[in-house]
Image (tube, coloured by chain):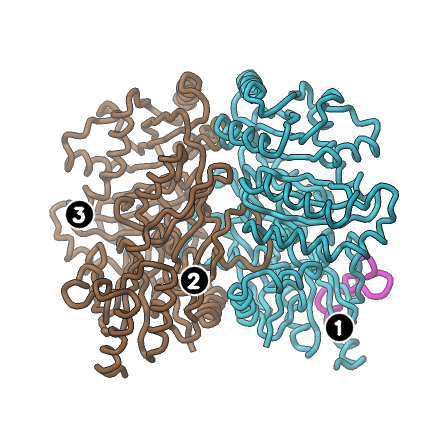
Chain colours: A cyan, B brown
């Protein structure tokens, strides 16, 4: 299909565009060929690291000129669904945006920040903070993921409840198309009704429609006061009643509402014995919730407001105990609990993961039915359930029964467990991927469960914008015949 | 192209689908053939009023089966750019969604409302209010525009600053495609990363890609306290300084920030002499701003907070006077001033309208330069400038010099004035249509000013989703060759 001569010629073209030092092959490319969770391992023709939008366009044109070559855009390579690593054909060029990491502009009156795709999320947060502003996107990989990857996968995280996903934080884009042209639309406009919404088509397209090279993002005033609280609640039903109460009382000041199941916390406590318990041991039954309030007003107003609402919730039986962080260190410990769950779970061994979403009101019924069905299917398996209850999104994971081998458990149960979980998700009008995306991991699942009408539209759009199948073939949906 | 027999047969098919009473022709169709501003007048083959999604799909299939027939979806027919009325060929079927106006569901825990496309915006607001919730989309036509039209045009209005445009208020859609299939995605999910964002492609597509038949919308807790204030500020620069201050102090509690120029208010005062002045007469120089704060907390907190911030702004020279509405009646009067400007302007005669957006920080420079250029081009013309300064969106209109005939003024100056204004908009990275859309009115302007790369992508998407050109041909962009 592709001759060795073609490979050499293409590498030479790429070197001519970005310089020898920025075309990696062999061992130098290795870190770009395997995903963060080490589930997908490929082999790239080369890893190319352009330094400018014009270079990206030239790289795209050079690759498009050789039949059989395709491009895998890559940010920080922290994706969870294998969307950013090459396949094993050796005919894919990994286009790493890592060198394009400049902050191009900050506009405090328009409340926008314009940044190149390869900027690490933490650096984007820092650039906003240096200007006294908040860029609220926040997730576990923020020290290494890039904003381009965040946009390409429409990342979620812990602040979606108030500020939305990456999509909702994006006002404008700069994109290199499959024709190697630059679509420059870095507009800091809240309102723009001049034709179809191309921006939101590229956001979340996982590198299959074009290469995002820069973005204009929303930033926000930094909250003046933050209250972090940890509560124990009897059930998911009472957790929702609490959420309704807190939302009514605080509206947009409610910035996080994270729920954690009893076993998820027990696992974390066992693995990290030095973490100070947010509540006395007797309060750990049922579910626990980390909630965060962020206000433009003074702490002397916010704290008593929070105390009063939680006291009312206690009286109504929605919670059985509550603790407000008294210091920044205590607040950090609460978040540390929440963030340590995935680590504790990994340390416990292999497990079956689901990143599901259902309408928030359906979450108690979903978890009840899924728990019962899985307890029947694989007795003794342990439920590690936690996540963004406020967004209707839980990480609904299943760990092998105590003492059983994780690998054997997965081999035996994974397909059946997925079927039970995803069938229920479908029945409740939910999604099999609330925030992680499709990539390679959930491609077949998507084909099976997404509506045929939607799939056909997606295929047509893919063919329309990338007729030759240059970008990330085999991921999300194929262009089809 | 199309034979009289074909017309009769199609009308008969349509009657068989929706019933005789719901296929209007001749005089019965007249109200659907002319737009609200009476600029576009066409002639429909028929106006069809389906009562269900299945009927819409059947109507689409019936029309698609006859070569040369196209469909113009229509909501409340309040659009400002001629996007919802038929052309004069007599070969277009107007598909009115007016009968599909049911509220299908309200979910208070998920904070969603599912409603059919033909529901009048005011009825959607009322359905939310009946459940103790807020649907915040609000605009002048709310008594007759429909939610389907609001979504198809990505409507803006007075609450965008806090709640976003129609796009940001929409979680899920039900759409009938050009193939007459139903894409049912009425999902109440905050997060869903399973493929391309089809939803946002239909939102704002002005009836050119499919027919929106229902939507799942975000609703919000109803604010507990609202403060409405009117301030006089020396310039747009000081207005922006004030906005920055108020945003920092109130964050998401700032729900409206509307600016009005001196002449816009003088015109309104002259036309509506019974409106009580929000400020003493001496304070009317420069610009005036209506600002609204909406809080989940008690009024006894919000009012002194607002007073303190405005006192600081006064001291900083950002404002020269301020008045807080003491009663609901006073607050209504303030809004009445803002909403009466377009009426006063229409009463004064024909004028040249622009619905422009630029990055908020660029608005003072834009207005200064545009004013100067237009004063040179047509001396004595009067600037009626007002709108959503908080969103970077002003209605930048020009009225004939006092005593001059509006029609003659338009005939002489409209193209030149548009060129000056839109050239400046382009230079400041803005938009020629912040909220009204493209339709017929701004189609040529779009072709001239939108980037060729974007236009080509839009054309390809249109061809991909509606290959036969069934929906609203000649509006927004054509599918091209």
Q: Are marks 3 and 2 in contact (CB under 8 Å)?
A: no
Relative image position of residue A395 (x, y in whole percent): 68, 44
Relative image position of residue A480 (x, y in whole percent): 60, 73
Quadrant, the N terminus of chain A = bottom right
Compute the Cα span from label 1 to label 2.
Answer: 36 Å
- Residue labelled with disc 2: B450
Q: Give the crowd class for mark 1: few <14, some 14-19, many >=20 residues within 10 Å.
A: many
Compute the Cα span from label 3 to label 2.
Answer: 32 Å
Chain letter for mark 2: B
Q: Quick check: B143 left or right of A394? A: left
Q: Is residue A33 above or below residue B226?
A: below
| 3 and 1 marks on the same chain | no
Relative image position of residue B415 (x, y in whole percent): 27, 60
Q: Quick check: A69 left or right of B5? A: right
Chain letter for mark 1: A
Furthest residue toward front: A376
Magenta stretch: give its range. Answer: A13-33
Residue B38 numbered mark, or none: none
Residue A32 part of the magenta-drawn span: yes
Compute the Cα span from label 3 to label 1.
Answer: 68 Å
Task: Decide if residue B361 is in sight here.
Answer: no
Residue B233: quarter of image: top left
- Residue labelled with disc 3: B401
Name the foreground residue: B333 vs B401: B333
Name the foreground residue: B417 vs B108: B108
- Residue labelled with disc 1: A91
Could you tell me which secondary element the residue under label 1 belongs to?
loop
């Amino acid at each position: 299909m592709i001759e060795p001569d073609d490979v050499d010629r293409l590498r030479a073209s790429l070197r001519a565009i970005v310089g020898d030092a920025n075309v990696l092959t062999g061992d130098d490319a290795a870190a770009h060929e395997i995903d963060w969770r080490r589930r997908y391992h490929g082999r790239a023709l080369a890893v190319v690291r352009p330094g400018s939008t014009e270079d990206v366009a030239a790289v795209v044109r050079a690759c498009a000129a050789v039949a059989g070559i395709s491009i895998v855009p890559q940010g920080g390579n922290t994706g969870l669904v294998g969307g950013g690593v090459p396949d094993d054909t050796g005919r894919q060029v990994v286009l790493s945006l890592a060198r394009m990491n400049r902050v191009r502009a900050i506009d405090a009156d328009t409340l926008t920040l314009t940044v190149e795709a390869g900027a690490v999320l933490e650096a984007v947060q820092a650039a906003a903070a240096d200007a006294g502003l908040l860029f609220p996107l926040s997730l576990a990989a923020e020290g290494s993921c890039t904003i381009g990857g965040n946009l390409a996968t429409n990342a979620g995280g812990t602040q979606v409840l108030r500020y939305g996903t990456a999509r909702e934080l994006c006002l404008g884009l700069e994109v290199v198309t499959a024709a190697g042209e630059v679509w420059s639309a870095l507009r800091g406009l809240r309102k723009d009704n001049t034709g179809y919404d191309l921006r939101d088509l590229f956001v979340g397209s996982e590198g299959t429609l074009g290469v995002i090279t820069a973005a204009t993002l929303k930033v926000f005033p930094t909250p003046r006061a933050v209250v972090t609280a940890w509560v124990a609640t009897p059930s998911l039903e009472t957790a929702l009643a609490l959420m309704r109460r807190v939302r009514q009382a605080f509206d947009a000041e409610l910035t996080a509402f994270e729920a954690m199941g009893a076993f998820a916390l027990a696992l974390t406590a066992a693995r990290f014995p030095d973490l100070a318990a947010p509540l006395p041991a007797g309060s750990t039954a049922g579910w626990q919730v980390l909630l965060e309030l962020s206000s433009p007003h003074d702490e002397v107003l916010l704290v008593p407001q929070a105390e009063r609402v939680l006291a009312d919730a206690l009286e109504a039986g929605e919670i059985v105990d509550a603790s407000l962080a008294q210091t920044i260190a205590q607040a950090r410990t609460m978040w540390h609990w929440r963030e340590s769950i995935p680590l504790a779970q990994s340390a416990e061994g292999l497990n079956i993961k689901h990143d599901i979403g259902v309408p928030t009101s359906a979450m108690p019924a979903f978890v009840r039915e899924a728990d019962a069905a899985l307890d029947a299917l694989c007795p003794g398996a342990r439920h590690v359930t936690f996540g963004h209850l406020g967004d209707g999104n839980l990480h609904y994971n299943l760990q092998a029964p105590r003492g059983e081998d994780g690998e054997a458990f997965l081999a035996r149960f994974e397909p059946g467990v997925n079927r039970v979980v995803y069938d229920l998700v479908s029945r409740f009008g939910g999604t099999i991927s609330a925030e992680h995306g499709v990539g390679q991991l959930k491609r077949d699942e998507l084909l099976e469960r997404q509506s045929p009408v939607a799939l056909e539209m997606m295929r047509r759009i893919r063919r329309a914008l990338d007729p030759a199948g240059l970008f990330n073939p085999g991921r999300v949906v194929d262009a089809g015949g």
